[in-house]
Image (tube, rainbow, N blue to C red):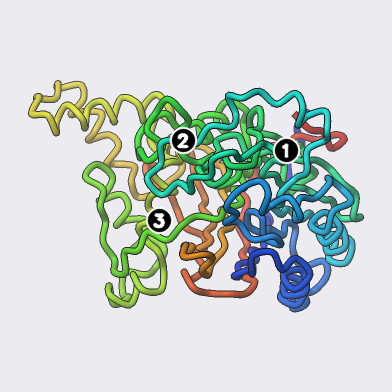
């Protein structure tokens, strides 16, 4: 069932800071201190990054085991429940979930391998003891659901069991249908090259198929180490430049801009979400990818392909062809941990379907620590109504 809502804002707060690995209590105090600046009743959704209280880089299952948490009763769940009650909003945070003895004993050997990643942490003898998870709590502090990261990064594979797919939660307006993912879930899944900017676009395709209103990614995404503004995209470079200009940052000094924001990472996120903004959706993304590859290899594009390209250029001003859109929230951590530097640059995108361009609502700095609230204006649209449920 659908009901119309008058134009309003979806109010989202992102918490970005540098947790200290293994210092759960200190990290929780820091998180609560940052959130103390939020007035109750002023936000609808509060997001924390991946494994925000424990830290992320653990060498193996032995090292992370003391910090594994049981769902609902662990420190991350308790913090989320407390904040949700106090602020009257929904709260999301990532944490290392402790598996039951039954799950550990039944875990097959296929989940214990390290993927072929150049920066993998090699830890012979690692065992599966947990899951890289996220918890969602509601405004009264009640537990709504849990999600386990499906596409594991090399570090996760030393201790974590993979999830079984994206989780969706149907929540009251102004949120609607919300889908959760964690960091590497935004990358292509095996057997595809996990570093590709092109298809498959699992998160975006799922969002389109399930008619998702809000996608939330909780990340511990590594810094690109590019310290200046530089678009590395051969196919979507002009679109990314327009996205930057549309955000109102064209006047920024390019050197300073690249130092403040990890723009290379922000561009990568936007391109991995391409079906949500490209004209024609997922099928168009695949067709354009094939066309671009043909051009790079020296093949001539057909008259039909040239017309499709021209048609897309005409809508790259960001004007929506319909009132359907997907709001994408990417909450990332910052700081350094065991020699790894994280990108920060938490961002919110307003992905207007078939507009030809992703639109930025706001971005945090790559080294910024704090809480930033953003309001996303909502047009008249249908919301799913009824009790909260999980899919």
**Which residue is at a point 78% across and 32% down the rendered structure image?**
390
| Above-or-below relation of 80 to 372 | above
**Is 217 above or below relative to 346?**
above
Quadrant assignment, res 14: bottom right
For marks 2 and 3, give the CA distance: 22 Å
CA distance for labels 1 and 2? 40 Å
Looking at the image, is mark 3 or mark 1 nearer the viewer? 3
| Residue at x 59% of width, y 32% of height | 112
User: Marks 3/1: CA distance?
Assistant: 32 Å
Counting other residues with Cα less than 10 Å from the Cα at mark 1, is it few (<14), some (14-19), or many (20 or more)? many
Residue denoted by label 2: 115
Q: Residue at x 55, y 55 (%)?
A: 220
> On the image, numbered disc 1 is attached to which residue?
383
Confirm whether residue 54 shows in the render.
yes
Judging from the image, what secondary structure is the residue with disc 2 in? loop
Q: For residue 223, what is the image quadrant?
A: bottom left
Q: Which mark is residue 233?
A: none
Give the residue at mark 3: 265
Q: Is residue 218 above or below residue 235?
A: below
Q: Secondary structure at mark 3?
A: helix
The answer to whether residue 48 is left or right of residue 195 is right
């Amino acid at each position: 069932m659908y009901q119309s809502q008058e134009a309003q804002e979806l109010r989202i707060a992102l918490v970005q800071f540098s947790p200290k690995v293994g210092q759960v209590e200190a990290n929780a105090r820091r998180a609560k201190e940052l959130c103390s600046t939020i007035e109750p009743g002023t936000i609808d959704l509060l997001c924390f990054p991946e494994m925000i209280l424990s830290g992320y880089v653990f060498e193996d299952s032995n090292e992370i085991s003391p910090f594994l948490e049981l769902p609902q009763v662990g420190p991350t769940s308790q913090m989320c429940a407390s904040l949700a009650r106090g602020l009257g909003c929904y709260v999301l945070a990532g944490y290392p979930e402790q598996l039951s003895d039954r799950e550990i004993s039944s875990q097959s050997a296929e989940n214990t391998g390290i993927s072929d990643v150049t920066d993998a942490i090699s830890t012979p003898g690692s065992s599966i003891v947990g899951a890289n998870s996220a918890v969602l709590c509601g405004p009264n502090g009640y537990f709504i659901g849990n999600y386990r990261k499906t596409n594991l990064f090399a570090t996760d594979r030393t201790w974590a069991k993979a999830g079984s797919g994206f989780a969706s939660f149907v929540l009251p307006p102004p949120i609607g249908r919300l889908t959760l993912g964690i960091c590497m879930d935004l990358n292509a899944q095996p057997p595809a090259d996990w570093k590709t900017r092109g298809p498959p676009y699992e998160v975006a395709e799922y969002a389109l198929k399930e008619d998702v209103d809000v996608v939330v990614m909780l990340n511990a995404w590594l810094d690109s180490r590019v310290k200046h503004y530089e678009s590395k995209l051969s196919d979507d470079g002009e679109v990314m430049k327009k996205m930057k200009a549309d955000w109102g940052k064209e006047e920024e000094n390019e050197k300073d801009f690249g130092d403040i924001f990890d723009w290379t990472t922000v561009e990568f996120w936007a391109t991995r979400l391409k079906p949500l903004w490209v004209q024609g959706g997922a099928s168009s993304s695949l067709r354009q990818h094939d066309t671009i590859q043909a051009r790079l290899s020296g093949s001539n594009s057909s008259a039909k392909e040239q017309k499709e390209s021209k048609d897309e250029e005409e809508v790259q001003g960001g004007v929506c062809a319909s009132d359907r859109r997907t709001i994408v929230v990417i909450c990332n951590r910052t700081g350094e941990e065991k020699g790894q530097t994280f990108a920060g640059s938490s961002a919110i995108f307003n992905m207007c379907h078939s507009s030809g361009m992703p639109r930025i609502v706001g971005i945090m700095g790559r080294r910024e620590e704090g809480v930033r609230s953003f309001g996303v204006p909502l047009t008249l649209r249908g919301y799913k109504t009824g009790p909260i449920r999980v899919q």
